[in-house]
């Protein structure tokens, strides 16, 4: 192999050539620093933009709260899946503002448009571009916020990171960014449902100090209709009224409260997730904790499990009437060793009170002067009811990405039928939107 100096001497350098280490030292250090910076191999470079999630089913969201619009690009979606705007619109309507008195009064229809990746009603396997326009911006509501930072909001940290920010509506830190997540999550939910019969349901289990007792809800049978039967999205009518009253109480005072969203997954394929760093619950935690206002994540027994002994906490195995290995209890939350075991996956996500409130608060200005601020604009007194479809979307994005990874790695060749279950679509042959010749 040629030495470094001989390699350098054979190549032009600033119009000349270099033949020795002495000549290298004679060049000014300023030029040298620019010219010989090592090139980092592409496989070692870190993607640090932060707006893309997934490896096989990759989603990039874009847009800002008061820009022209928001949306997403989905790359890696399997081809030949029936898909239209209406498939996404259902969940976008659940997420949109202005639904009731306990949400922000901003009026947006959040009507989506698919610009690419779908032809004659079927996905083509190429990137799917979804766009939702912003139609009810009020930039003047944020004139004070251009000068002063809202406490506990992202205003200050965006300035600290970028040195510039979109003031109106909080830009990318606004929950409006989640439109792209919900639209792509709807596609992921459709794939999971069609392929494996997987259902993802989230509901509000706590608002401020109103806590829904766990034994009131049967996660085996709870339905979307029960969850959507009231404006707070709690499947128990009595506790739903208590939660609505708690939100109303702070709403009229210009204040806000937080709460908890519980999410369950039924009929999740076994074997999803990978050991060590890519455990399924770790991927779920990262995904849901990337949502705005999240402050906590519990999986399975969560922190309550720390009060139990091993003999109390362990999920004992048995063989059910279909010959499948099951667990009698589910304190593991449907995942063991970072891999799904086929039981119901359950998790809880804590959301803080909305940062932007209509009460006077102490803060500082961008030029480092102490001041007071009463934030204007339209904001949710409690983000939790609208967070329900957002949580479902992020869980779906994790599971469909893991499903595709599992299919590629462990189902490429015939499975070990004594231990594994093949990943087969639940679609009947006549339902499959293509024919095999």
Image (cartoon, rainbow, N blue to C red):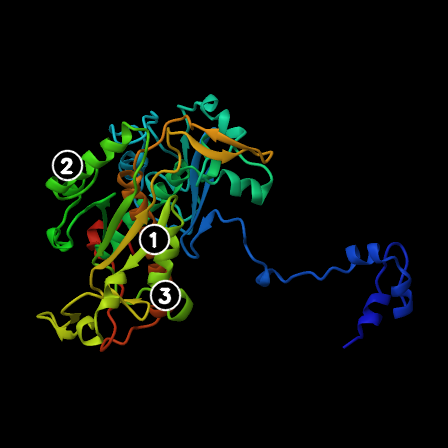
- Above-or-below relation of 346 to 377: below
User: Is residue 149 at least partly visible in the picture?
Assistant: no
The residue depicted at 34 percent of the width and 27 percent of the height is: 108
**From the viewer's perspective, is 323 left or right of 278?**
left
What is the C-alpha distance between the residues marked 3 and 1?
18 Å
Residue 118: horizontal and vertical position, in percent? 38, 41
Residue under pointer 1 = 296
The answer to whether residue 207 is left or right of residue 110 is left
**Residue pointed to by mark 3:** 279
Measured from the top left, where is residue 19 in percent x and y? Answer: 90, 68
Q: CA distance from mark 2 to mark 3?
A: 38 Å
- Point out which mark residue 382 bears: none
The residue positioned 49% from the left and 35% from the top of the image is 363
Q: Earlier in the sequence, mark 1 or mark 2?
A: 2
* Quarter assignment of residue 121: top left
For image coordinates 24% across by 76% down, the residue present is: 419
* Residue that mark 2 sits on: 241
Q: Residue 191 at what x, y percent from top left?
A: 29, 51
**Marked residue nearer the N-terminal end (2 or 3):** 2
Q: Closest to the observer: 361 or 182?
A: 361
């Amino acid at each position: 192999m040629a030495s470094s100096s001989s390699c350098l001497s054979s190549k032009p350098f600033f119009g000349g050539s270099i033949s020795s280490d002495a000549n290298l030292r004679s060049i000014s250090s300023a030029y040298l620093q620019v010219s010989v910076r090592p090139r980092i191999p592409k496989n070692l470079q870190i993607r640090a933009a932060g707006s893309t999630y997934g490896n096989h089913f990759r989603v990039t969201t874009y847009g800002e709260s008061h820009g022209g619009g928001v949306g997403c690009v989905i790359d890696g979606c399997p081809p030949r899946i029936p898909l239209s705007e209406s498939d996404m619109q259902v969940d976008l309507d659940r997420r949109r503002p202005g639904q009731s008195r306990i949400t922000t009064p901003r009026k947006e229809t959040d009507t989506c448009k698919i610009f690419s990746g779908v032809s004659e009603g079927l996905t083509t396997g190429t990137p799917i571009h979804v766009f939702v326009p912003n139609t009810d911006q009020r930039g003047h509501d944020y004139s004070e916020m251009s000068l002063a930072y809202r406490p506990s909001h992202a205003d200050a940290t965006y300035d600290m990171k970028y040195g510039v920010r979109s003031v109106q509506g909080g830009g990318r830190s606004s929950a409006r960014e989640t439109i792209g997540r919900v639209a792509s999550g709807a596609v992921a939910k459709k794939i999971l449902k069609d392929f494996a019969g997987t259902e993802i349901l989230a509901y509000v289990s706590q608002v401020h100090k109103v806590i829904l007792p766990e034994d009131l809800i049967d996660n085996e049978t709870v339905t979307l209709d029960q969850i959507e039967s009231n404006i707070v999205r709690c499947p128990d009518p009595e506790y739903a009224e208590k939660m609505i009253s708690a939100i109303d109480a702070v709403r009229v005072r210009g204040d806000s409260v937080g709460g908890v969203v519980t999410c369950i997954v039924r009929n999740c394929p076994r074997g999803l997730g990978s050991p060590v760093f890519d455990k399924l619950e770790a991927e779920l935690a990262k995904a849901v904790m990337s949502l705005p206002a999240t402050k906590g994540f519990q999986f399975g027994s969560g922190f309550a499990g720390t009060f139990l002994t091993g003999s109390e906490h362990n999920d004992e195995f048995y063989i059910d009437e279909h010959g499948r290995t099951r667990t009698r209890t589910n304190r593991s939350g449907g995942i063991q060793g970072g891999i799904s075991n086929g039981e119901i996956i359950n998790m809880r996500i804590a959301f803080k009170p909305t940062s932007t409130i209509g009460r006077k608060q102490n803060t500082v200005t961008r030029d480092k002067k102490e001041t007071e601020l009463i934030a204007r604009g339209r904001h949710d007194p409690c983000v939790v009811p609208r967070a329900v479809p957002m949580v479902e979307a992020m869980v779906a994005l994790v599971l469909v990405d893991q499903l595709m990874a599992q299919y590629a790695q462990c189902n490429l060749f015939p499975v070990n039928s004594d231990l594994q279950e093949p990943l087969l679509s639940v679609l009947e042959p006549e339902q499959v939107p293509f024919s095999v010749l």
